Image (spheres, rainbow, N blue to C red):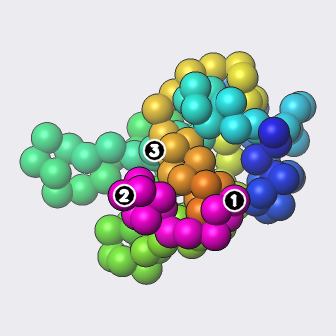
Amino acid sequence: DPVSRYLPKFANLQVRRKGGDGLEPLKRPMTLRHLLMHTSGLTYGPGRTDRGDRLVARTVAEKSYRELVRRQDSGEVDSLEKLCDALSEKPLMFQPGAGYEYGFSLDVLGRTMELVTGQPLRRIIRE
């Protein structure tokens, strides 16, 4: 199933162009399978230094996620709903199915599970 079936904001995602800073539209929809296989195009964004004191964004995609990571750290983005809303505004690192990258895919899948079941993910996992 397309992710946009459950999260309509994911229908019009933008994708970072290969080898450049520009963006392009999705060529095919992101699917639940892409989320499960880490081929959705989502990333985690910037990493931490060895000391853990600041975010280090090395690529264009990581730089675009830096603000989101800071908002999570501050507690402003404190639910899967808020996280998915924010992710729907960030460019994908690559077209869904065209690469492999650990990222927020399982978080988006968790939000989808919440919507399908009408229960919080914590309860779904517990049961």
Q: Amino acid at mark 2?
A: Arg
Assess whether residue 122 is covered by the magenta stretch.
Answer: yes
Looking at the image, is mark 1 or mark 3 nearer the viewer? 1
Identify the disc placed on residue 116.
1
Q: Which segment is the magenta one?
A: 115-127
Q: Main secondary structure of the magenta part?
A: helix
Q: CA distance from mark 2 to mark 3?
A: 26 Å
Q: Looking at the image, do the residues carrying marks 1 and 3 touch, with CB atoms under 8 Å apart?
A: no
Q: CA distance from mark 2 to mark 1?
A: 16 Å
Q: Residue at x 77, y 57 (%)?
A: 6
Q: Amino acid at mark 1?
A: Val
Identify the disc placed on residue 126.
2
Circle 3: element type:
loop
Q: CA distance from mark 1 to mark 3?
A: 24 Å
Q: Residue at x 43, y 74 (%)?
A: 78
Q: Nearer the viewer, residue 100 or 118?
A: 118
Circle 1: element type:
helix
Give how far across and how far down residue 31 sits, in percent. 75, 36
Q: Amino acid at mark 3?
A: Tyr
Give how far across and how far down residue 56 sits, in percent. 33, 46
In the rendered image, which residue does mark 3 sit on? 44
Assess whether residue 84 is covered by the magenta stretch.
Answer: no
Q: Quadrant of the N terminus?
A: top right
